[in-house]
Amino acid sequence: MDIRDQVVLVTGASRGLGAATAKVFGREGAKVVVNYVNNEVKANEVVSSIGKDRSIAIRADVRNEKEVKRMFEHARAHFGQPITTIVNNALIDFTFNGDQKKNLDTIEWSDFQTQFEGSILGALNTLKAGRHDMAEAHFGKIINIGTNLFQNPVVAYHDYNTSKAALLGLTRNMAKELGADGITVNMVSGGLLEKTDASAATPDAVFSIIKESTPLQKVTSPEDVAYSILFFASPWSRAVTGQNLVVDGGLVMD
């Protein structure tokens, strides 16, 4: 299915990578569901950028199964066709601030639970909500957003990094289960992105170090990652599933 024929859900799409991804899909002609949980104003700005004829902002907390199910029903009623592509991008209560990160002595299990609920529970809820329609159409594209930090934890964000490592496990298990239904499940893992709300607290010196250490001599932008996400939704990736593509300018070579 061409991208212009797809209905794409991007979770956490009011800002940062989510907003960039929603806009890239919009430019390619897809119908886009801009999911948000808190910032309705920014979500509607993304919709205005794409065009109100091809996008809609829908509030839903991805950790809440009932809200996610209603979001899928709302999207289907609005566009007249079901969601075919899911980008699990939502980030729950986290900022990339190395000076304030918790270490072994201060981190609690509740910190891990918060990130596991955002990454794993959120993805599980969207997969459950979308699976039936995708299987019926024998077409579906699931793209989970990871991080290069669980492969190379240059900053040991224990809770966030571990939740994304677990998300790769979920990605590969779901790729195995859903492949027979014509559904692919992949992951795109960016590095620290310059500069989003989530990375705003990161000192400029850190970005300078990343730039100097990266073969492409640049810090990855949200748009750089968004175009790789687009690949996994396109017909060009039709035989690719269960994979993790690291998009960080070559900083981590997997």
Image (tube, helix red, strand yellow):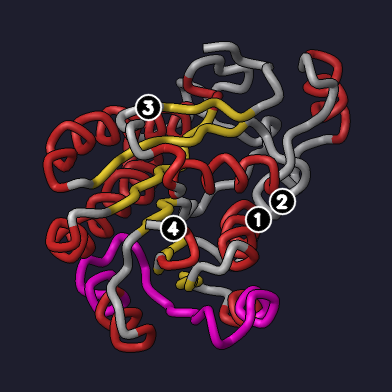
For marks 2 and 1 on the same chain, the one whose residue lies earlier in the sequence: 1
Q: Is residue 93 left or right of residue 67?
A: right
Question: Could you tell me if residue 20 is visible in this image?
Answer: yes
Between the residue at mark 4 and the residue at mark 3, the CA separation in whole angstroms equals 21 Å
Question: Disc 2, disc 1: CB below 8 Å?
Answer: yes
Image depth: mark 1 or mark 3 in front: 3
Which type of secondary structure does the marked residue at label 3 adopt? loop
Between the residue at mark 2 and the residue at mark 4, the CA separation in whole angstroms equals 29 Å
Q: Say few, some or many: other residues with alpha carbon within 10 Å of mark 2 (under 14 / 14 to 19 / 20 or more).
A: some
Image depth: mark 2 or mark 3 in front: 3
Q: Say few, some or many: other residues with alpha carbon within 10 Å of mark 4 (under 14 / 14 to 19 / 20 or more).
A: few
Mark 2 = which residue? Answer: 196
Question: What range of the chain is rendered magenta?
Answer: 45-71
Which label belongs to residue 2? Answer: 4
Between the residue at mark 2 and the residue at mark 3, the CA separation in whole angstroms equals 25 Å
Which type of secondary structure does the marked residue at label 4 adopt? loop
Mark 1 = which residue? Answer: 16
